[in-house]
Amino acid sequence: MKRTSAAICLFTLCATVLFGCVPGAGSAQEPPEKTVGSPIVVGFSQVGAESEWRVANSESMKSALSEENGFELIFDDARNEQENQIRAIRTFIQQDVDYIVFSPRVETGWTSILQEARDAEIPVIVIDRDIQVEDRSLYTAYIGSDFRREGETAVRWLESLMQRRGKADRPLRIVHIQGTVGSSAQIGRTAALEAALERNPNWEIIAQELGDFTRAKAYEVMGAILEETKDIDVVYCENDGEALGAIDAMEEAGLTCNAGDGVIVISFDATKLGLTYCLAGKIALNVECNPLQGPYVADLIRRLERGETVEQIMHVDETAFDSFTITKEMIEGRGY
Ligand code: GZL
């Protein structure tokens, strides 16, 4: 398949780690200009289809890297297994694609396959979750979220709420439902909560379970926790799927979820479904995690094709919504 000498040249030039920011989910993105000539062949390894967020991410990639936009997309669903991603990337190399894009299920275990891609002189773009590799020149760019910042947004909001209520020093009993362990989304969101516990010795994690970013698993683990105790002040869920599963379990156990006199539920993603729960008051805070990365990837590839230097790390701008200020109009205007 066609390979671009310019991109290969840039691949070696992008060794410096430069930071850039791309606009958030709400901002308009110019559709990439049409490509004359043969399509740019992109192999994309997607984690799976575990959440509404993931589905929106896949749709964004498919619509941006479409044939009419000058691409040929080879999409592989890894069904939430890193081994399947490694196998898919190796196949992309054998197919001699022009670019490899992947959303890494977890941060580690990628060095060897990325070295194979570099040996084949195929540029690699990492999206969504980040990776940990000694040699950052093994990939051309990362486009995704600053997960620690997302978590900081959540815990600072909770601290501020407690201060406004004169409860800054009161005990706070927290249930923590984590996302896929070892994913940068879980690592960042968990780290922010753990740092907040250091700042607030009156906060206590009464239970910490794995929800793997799915509604079903969160429902299961929250149900088990509720058999032990219903004395819960906060449930910190690392995505909307987990929040909905935890809320299902708590409501079945007779608990009320709201930021007033009920259990305070904190979530991440801000999908339309999650925001409807926020509007209903059941999710107190929902921190946005922008899945609409397709246009940014298409734009990045075009810049590489033109021989431009690109920032290696690009974080998308993100915001947050709470049940006190969210409106129906805010939800209707969103892209996912
Ligand atoms: C975050 C993304 C996470 C979402 C979950 O960028 O990797 O994975 O928060 C998804 O909804 O499953």
Image (cartoon, rainbow, N blue to C red):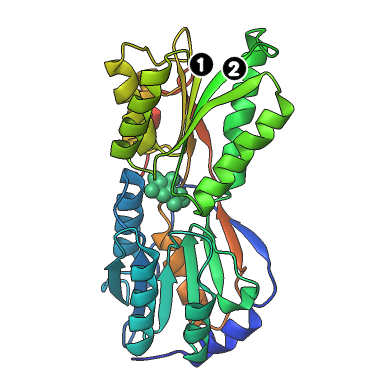
Q: Where residue 163 sits: x, y (%)?
A: 67, 14
| Residue at 33 percent of width and 82 percent of height | 91
Quarter of the picture containing the C terminus is: top left
Q: Mark 2 — residue?
A: 172
Question: Seen in the image, is 124 located left or right of residue 223?
Answer: right
Q: Which type of secondary structure does the marked residue at label 2 adopt?
A: strand
Q: Disc 1 vs disc 2: Cβ atoms closer than 8 Å? A: yes
Q: Which type of secondary structure does the marked residue at label 1 adopt?
A: loop
Dot 1, crowdedness within 10 Å: few (<14), some or many (≥20)?
A: some
Q: Mark 1 — residue?
A: 233
Mark 2 is on which residue type? Leu
Q: Where residue 265 sits: x, y (%)?
A: 45, 24
* Near-viewer residue (263 or 18): 263
Q: Quadrant of residue 199?
A: top right
Residue 145, compared with residue 287, is above or below; it is below
Which numbered disc flags the more N-terminal residue, 1 or 2? 2
Q: Where residue 235 sits: x, y (%)?
A: 47, 25
* Near-viewer residue (110 or 127): 110
